[in-house]
Image (cartoon, helix red, strand yellow):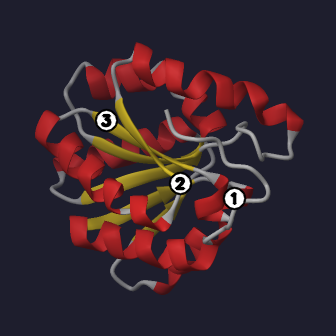
Amino acid sequence: MAMPTTSSQKTYGPEAARLITEELTRCGVKLVVTLPDSWMGKLYDELDREPGFTRVRVFAEPEGIGICAGAYFGGMGSCLVMANAGFLLCTYHLPTLLLMHRIPLLMLISYRGRIGDTAFFQEYQGLLTEPLLNLMEIQFTVVDGLEDIPKIGEAYRHSRLSRRPAAVLLTRSVLV
């Protein structure tokens, strides 16, 4: 289990955003589907600067799942970027579309509700994220520092190899 992020830990926002973008490029991701999230701002800015990506903004996480599934069948590498609250909203769509039909998907998820998150109302998302990933047998990894960013590529490749979703939980220290 990864150590919780505390508010006194170093944050890597802009540098991590650049490295995450580079890692997605190395993986062959061309389409990035995003949802609003206050921690993802630096990453979204970096993605928008990179001409190799098409960024699609959606209003509901299940829309993102459908778009990424379509991209897969069209031969395009994609990922879905959302908060863990949004992941919780996908607990119907992940099993009935992606898991049932063996469709790979890389999910980059902000890991809200952990120690160091100052929004008390995020606590339950933090408590439920890993148990729900385990329940759906979705492999995941936690990225808590710059040295962990290559795990994104590993998760992408695992998702493609296993033809199943994979999740990368991005902590506050990486995003803010």
* Residue type highlighted by circle 3: Pro
Residue at label 1? 39
Q: Does label 1 or label 2 sit earlier along the sequence? A: 1
- Report the side of 80 relative to 118 (left or right): left
Q: Secondary structure at mark 1?
A: helix
Residue at label 3? 165
Tags 1 and 3 in contact by the CB under 8 Å rule? no
Callout 2: few (<14), some (14-19), or many (20+) C-alpha neighbours within 10 Å? many
- Point out residue 73 in the picture as x, y percentages from the top left corner: 18, 46
- Point out residue 88 in the picture as x, y percentages from the top left corner: 59, 27
* Residue type highlighted by circle 2: Asp
- Point out residue 39 in the picture as x, y percentages from the top left corner: 69, 59
Q: Quadrant of residue 11?
A: bottom right
Tell me if residue 108 comes above or below residue 112 in the rendering. below
- Report the side of 52 relative to 42 (left or right): left
Callout 3: few (<14), some (14-19), or many (20+) C-alpha neighbours within 10 Å? many
Q: Residue at x 24, y 39 (%)?
A: 104
As drawn, which residue projects farthest toward the left? 161
Residue at label 2? 144
C-alpha gap between disc 2 and disc 3:
20 Å
